[in-house]
Image: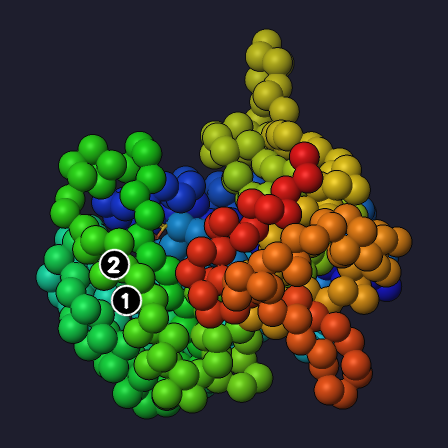
């Protein structure tokens, strides 16, 4: 059996945050119910393409999946377990937001098999949360964390954001200190810088943000501080306690197979990339069989693209280099029949000389790896650009 991961998109939120360009919006209970029905229908219909695959990880993301009633999450995961071979040891993650979690929902999630929760905190300063347009306070987060722990979840990620309006180096450090002094300590921390995307309220209002030097310093503090607290950085923006790296995200960076269900969900299976429509109405109508006779149905699956070998090699390099372990030269050769040096003559050596990349040898296996250095991570975009072939 081959391995596949599943991503399930829930496009609902209580309210739109000011910086958000994700596919999400507020919705009523009927709309949510119809969406869940459509999702289960897609999961069922697509299953015939995956009879020879075992599901290794499932990730329910959004949006805010925790706005759905607990029984809906159970219904979705039941559909997956009924129609796919789900590995006994499957990592099943779900994103949740403070202010949307109840003890009742936690019972459903646990019973449905969820074994990893990712909490969107972003900042442990109320003023900063307000500036981001988040719906919750720091106290809401603390209540959520306590109830999640009480329900028996021990694999918990916390999402943080740096370089946000009204944030200073010391307030950011305060956020890091607060979350690492929780009991128990979170297993995993994702820390991203705010990016102001076109089309968001932030793009229009252009709030004052910490400058680039401050942003770089925040990134440095994140690594230094979290390392001192026992986390290891395994990807540019991700830190984990031993044994708690997110297996699902590693599938993306290592170019494993994944299939996305739900509106706008992206997939990559056997080097073919495809994506569902981003229009929820079309998605729901299609999977609930509600397309009117007069209207021509809009295709629900968009942009199917078979990756060329060059594109696969590019992705191998720039997704793999996001991980601090880097890329395996042996694996590159096994997948493409050519060495990294043959495809990218001189590039690795040049970046090694400049101190942006380094070569490592695994003492146990003798396998050779290429990875970004700490400085290389700072300017990773420049390094990655050199691995483009197309
Ligand atoms: S909670 Fe997340 S997905 Fe929802 S609006 Fe805020 S940033 Fe966007």
Q: Which residue occupies the foreground of this view, 296 or 18?
A: 18
Question: Would you say the beta carbon of the disc 2 residue lies within 8 angstroms of ligand 1?
Answer: no
Give the class, few, some or many, for how many residues have Cα within 10 Å of label 2's Cα (few <14, many ≥20).
Answer: few
Picture coordinates of residue 116 (x, y %)?
A: 50, 73
Q: Residue at x 61, y 19 (%)?
A: 297
Q: Is residue 383 above or below residue 303?
A: below
Question: Is residue 374 visible from the viewing direction of this image?
Answer: yes
Numbered tag placed on residue 217 in the rendering: 1
On the image, which quarter does residue 45 sit in? top right
Tell me the element at label 1.
Answer: helix
Outermost residue toward the top?
Answer: 294
Question: Is residue 157 visible from the viewing direction of this image?
Answer: no
Q: Is residue 288 above or below residue 268?
A: above
Q: Which residue occupies the foreground of this view, 95 or 270?
A: 270
Q: Which residue occupies the foreground of this view, 184 or 381?
A: 381
Rendered-image quadrant of the N terminus? bottom right
Residue ID for mark 2: 213
Disc 1/disc 2 C-alpha distance (Å): 6 Å
Q: Total of numbered circles in the picture?
A: 2
Q: Residue at x 24, y 66 (%)?
A: 123
The figure's colour scheme reads rainbow
Q: Is residue 346 left or right of residue 15?
A: right
Q: Is residue 93 left or right of residue 22?
A: right
On the image, which quarter does residue 222 sit in? bottom left
Q: Is residue 197 above or below residue 93?
A: above
Q: Residue at x 67, y 35 (%)?
A: 390
Query: Pointers 1 and 2 in contact (CB under 8 A)?
Result: yes
On the image, which quarter does residue 196 sit in? top left
Q: Which residue occupies the foreground of this view, 246 or 23?
A: 246
Give the class, few, some or many, for how many residues have Cα within 10 Å of label 1's Cα (few <14, many ≥20).
Answer: few
Picture coordinates of residue 349 (x, y %)?
A: 66, 60
Q: Residue at x 11, y 61 (%)?
A: 127
């Amino acid at each position: 059996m081959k391995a596949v991961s599943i991503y399930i998109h829930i496009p609902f939120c209580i309210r739109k945050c000011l910086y958000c360009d994700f596919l999400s919006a507020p919705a009523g209970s009927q709309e949510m119910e119809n969406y869940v029905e459509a999702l289960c229908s897609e999961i069922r219909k697509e299953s015939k393409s995956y009879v020879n695959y075992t599901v290794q990880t499932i990730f329910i993301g959004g949006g805010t999946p925790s706005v759905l009633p607990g029984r809906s999450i159970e219904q979705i995961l039941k559909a997956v377990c009924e129609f796919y071979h789900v590995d006994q040891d499957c990592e099943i993650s779900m994103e949740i937001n403070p202010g949307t979690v109840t003890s009742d929902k936690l019972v459903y999630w646990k019973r449905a098999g969820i074994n990893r929760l990712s909490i969107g905190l972003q900042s442990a300063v109320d003023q900063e949360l307000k500036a981001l347009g988040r719906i919750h306070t720091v106290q809401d987060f603390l209540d959520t964390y306590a109830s999640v722990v009480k329900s028996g979840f021990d694999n918990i990620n916390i999402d943080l954001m740096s370089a946000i309006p009204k944030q200073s180096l010391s307030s950011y450090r305060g956020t890091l200190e607060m979350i690492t002094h929780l009991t128990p300590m979170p297993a995993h921390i994702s820390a991203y810088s705010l990016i102001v995307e076109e089309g968001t309220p932030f793009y229009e209002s252009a709030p004052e943000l910490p400058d680039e030097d401050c942003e770089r310093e925040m990134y440095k503090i994140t690594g230094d501080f979290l390392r001192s607290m026992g986390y290891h950085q395994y990807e540019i923006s991700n830190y984990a306690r031993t044994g708690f790296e997110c297996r699902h995200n590693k599938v993306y960076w290592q170019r494993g197979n994944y299939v996305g269900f739900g509106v706008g969900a992206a997939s990559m299976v056997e080097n073919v990339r495809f994506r569902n429509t981003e229009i929820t109405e079309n998605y729901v109508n299609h999977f609930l069989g509600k397309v009117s006779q007069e209207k021509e149905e809009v295709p629900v699956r968009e942009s199917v693209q078979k990756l060329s070998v060059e594109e696969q090699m590019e992705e191998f390099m720039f997704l793999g280099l996001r991980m601090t372990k880097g890329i395996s030269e042996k694996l590159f050769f096994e997948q493409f029949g050519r060495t990294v040096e043959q495809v990218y003559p001189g590039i690795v050596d040049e970046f090694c000389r400049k101190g942006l990349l380094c070569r490592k040898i695994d003492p146990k296996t003798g396998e050779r790896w290429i990875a970004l250095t700490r400085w290389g991570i700072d300017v990773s975009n420049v390094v990655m650009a050199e691995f483009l072939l197309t």
